[in-house]
């Protein structure tokens, strides 16, 4: 407890754990409000189809973090002698958050803070990881206790991501460093681990910082709002090192850092590409939001008309063209999402392309500006947004490979305003793929990899395949949590036997082309249950102490 008798503030990266979680009875009552959907779930459960029932239940009542089943117990502490024997010196930050690393001592420095315990087996695991001379920093997973004698929260971290770390400090206070790599570095007090990690990534490359997916520490650590100034300074330093010193570093009320990278003048033209076949009830709100709720001065709207016949839709097209608000491009024939977008992208005039589904509506007016700032970076390929469905829940928070049987949208069915695990929903971070329901990319990068693969992925997975091909040529995919839009997913599509057969064929094609990557997403922790909505619960049998390879 704090001096005023209240629980201590949650560290910014852990705000997701402070969000309310309904009890089982409340979730059951929520399900019973929809008996037509609840009864098939009960039937599936009683017939032994437990996974299908669980997936449908989450879709019905919403997703929440569940860490209490089973109850987590921390491991024993690592003896000091084990650290010394492994060539590791433990260095604890002082009361001001400052550290002092001397030139003499064991080759590995384990940076920690008061209240942290090193987990049994950590010394051997750290020493083994540093056997690779190209590794200069190692961080692992942790168990966190918010209050004395309270439950333990597992902190399962992703592979190293410099963009993510600049936005949210997901590392925490425990990190192992190669002594020779940090001698002479003056770390920012209060953000020493963050500052030194970013400095190592700059000096030796991002591959020099590795995540070891096992529990290395447990305990409490306090950061809260008072650590934000230190984090901001550490990020500012990193931008200076990277030659981006003029970039404003803004800290939000939730502690998430936003980098407003400079934009060229005049602003580059963005071509907003919207496929549709009638469905004026969806199209009109989409187009009007792009016209009037999108604060970007240089944009053109291209509507891909796939054989619309409705008189009201055709009249709306004529009005838009008469006002100079949009161009309507005829795209006749059977609906082929990939081919239609490729065809219209080839006619677009913009330096950037923004692929938008006709069932998407802009919410925050700066969504396009936020995405363009990232898409213009030379090393970035596709950029995606946070999409919220008609029930106010997350529809897209990045695409996670190897979950839900193949791929799923990150944090699917969580509350639309949720922070996300380790702040992931609000952060700007690397992901394996993003949905083409709202995807921004520079036109020359799109052309460089041949656009969408229409011959293999006409309807489904064309966005996943595009992002993976971009990643393969060194263009990273980013999710921008500050860009928020609404998406009534698949509201304009109708199921059919032919569609089901086509979907099965595209599933097999994705497995054949990208099978090894689908086994485990590098941005997602293997300790999570891969079968339900991401970040929902732990994998059965997870202890966090199993041998693991750094990644």
Image (tube, rainbow, N blue to C red):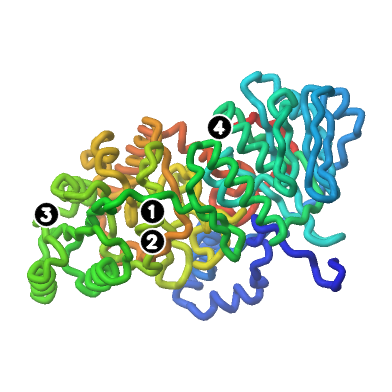
Q: Which residue is mark 1?
A: 371
Q: Count neighbours of disc 2 (C-alpha within 10 A) and say few if under 14, some if 14 to 19, many if 20 or more.
A: many
Q: Count neighbours of disc 1 (C-alpha within 10 A) and say few if under 14, some if 14 to 19, many if 20 or more.
A: many
What number is the disc on residue 435? none
Q: Secondary structure at mark 4?
A: helix
Q: Which residue is mark 2?
A: 367
**Between 497 and 476, which is closer to the camera in this rendering?**
476
Say whether residue 399 is visible: yes
Q: Which residue is mark 3?
A: 331
- CA gap, disc 3 to disc 2? 28 Å
- CA gap, disc 1 to disc 3? 27 Å
Q: Is residue 282 above or below residue 11?
A: below
Q: Nearer the viewer, mark 3 or mark 2?
A: 2
Q: Is residue 517 above or below residue 163?
A: above
Quarter of the image with the C terminus in it:
top right
Which residue: 66% across, 41% down?
195
Q: Count neighbours of disc 4 (C-alpha within 10 A) and say few if under 14, some if 14 to 19, many if 20 or more.
A: some
Which residue: 46% across, 35% down?
517
**Between 332 and 485, which is closer to the camera in this rendering?**
485
Q: Count neighbours of disc 3 (C-alpha within 10 A) and say few if under 14, some if 14 to 19, many if 20 or more.
A: many
**Where is residue 295 drawn, in percent x and y?**
33, 65
Q: Which residue is mark 4?
A: 206
Which residue: 86% across, 60% down?
148
**Where is residue 43 drawn, in percent x and y?**
52, 67
Q: Earlier in the sequence, mark 1 or mark 4?
A: 4
């Amino acid at each position: 407890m704090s001096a005023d008798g209240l629980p201590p503030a949650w560290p910014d990266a852990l705000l997701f754990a402070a969000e309310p979680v309904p009890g089982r009875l409340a979730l059951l009552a929520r399900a019973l409000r929809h008996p037509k959907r609840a009864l098939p779930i009960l039937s599936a459960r009683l017939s032994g189809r437990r996974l299908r029932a669980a997936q449908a239940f989450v879709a019905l009542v919403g997703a929440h973090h569940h860490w209490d089943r089973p109850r987590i117990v921390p491991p024993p502490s690592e003896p000091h002698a084990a650290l010394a024997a492994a060539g590791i010196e433990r260095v604890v930050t002082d009361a001001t958050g400052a550290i002092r690393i001397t030139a003499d001592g064991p080759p590995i420095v384990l940076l920690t803070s008061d209240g942290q315990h090193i987990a049994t087996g950590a010394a051997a695991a750290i020493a083994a990881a540093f056997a690779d001379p190209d590794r200069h920093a190692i961080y692992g997973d942790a168990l966190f206790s918010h209050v004395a004698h309270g439950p333990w929260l597992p902190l399962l971290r992703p592979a190293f991501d410099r963009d993510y770390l600049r936005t949210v400090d997901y590392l925490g206070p425990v990190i192992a460093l190669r002594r020779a790599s940090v001698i002479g570095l003056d770390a920012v007090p209060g953000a020493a681990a963050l500052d030194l990690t970013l400095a190592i990534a700059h000096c030796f490359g991002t591959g020099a910082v590795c995540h070891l997916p096992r529990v290395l520490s447990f305990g409490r650590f306090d950061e809260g709002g008072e650590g934000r100034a230190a984090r901001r300074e550490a990020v500012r330093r990193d931008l200076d090192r990277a030659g981006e010193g003029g970039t404003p570093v803004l800290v939000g009320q939730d502690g998430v850092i936003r980098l407003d990278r400079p934009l060229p003048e005049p602003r580059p033209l963005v071509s907003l590409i919207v496929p549709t076949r009638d469905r004026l009830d969806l199209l009109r709100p989409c187009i009007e939001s792009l016209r009037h709720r999108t604060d970007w001065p240089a944009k053109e709207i291209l509507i891909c008309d796939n054989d619309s016949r409705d008189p009201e839709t055709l009249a709306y097209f004529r009005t838009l063209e008469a006002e100079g608000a949009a161009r309507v491009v005829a795209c006749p024939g059977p609906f082929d999402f990939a081919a239609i977008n490729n065809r219209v992208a080839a006619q677009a005039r913009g330096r950037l392309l923004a692929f938008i589904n006709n069932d998407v509506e802009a919410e925050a007016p700066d969504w396009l500006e936020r995405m363009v700032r990232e898409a213009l970076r030379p090393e970035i390929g596709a950029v995606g947004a946070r999409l919220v469905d008609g029930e106010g829940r997350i529809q897209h928070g990045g695409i996670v490979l190897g979950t839900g049987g193949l791929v799923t949208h990150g944090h699917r069915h969580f509350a639309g305003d949720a922070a996300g695990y380790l702040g992931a929903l609000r952060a700007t971070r690397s992901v394996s793929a993003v949905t083409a329901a709202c995807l921004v990319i520079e036109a020359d990068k799109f052309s460089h990899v041949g656009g969408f693969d229409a011959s293999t992925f006409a309807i489904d997975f064309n966005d996943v395949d595009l992002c993976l091909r971009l990643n393969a040529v060194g263009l990273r995919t980013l999710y921008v949590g500050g860009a928020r839009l609404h998406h009534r997913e698949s509201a304009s599509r109708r199921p059919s036997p032919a569609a089901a057969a086509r979907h099965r064929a595209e599933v097999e094609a994705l497995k054949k082309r990208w099978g090894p990557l689908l086994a485990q997403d590098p941005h997602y922790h293997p300790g999570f249950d891969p079968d339900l909505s991401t970040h929902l619960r732990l994998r059965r049998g997870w202890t966090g102490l199993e041998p693991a390879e750094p990644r």
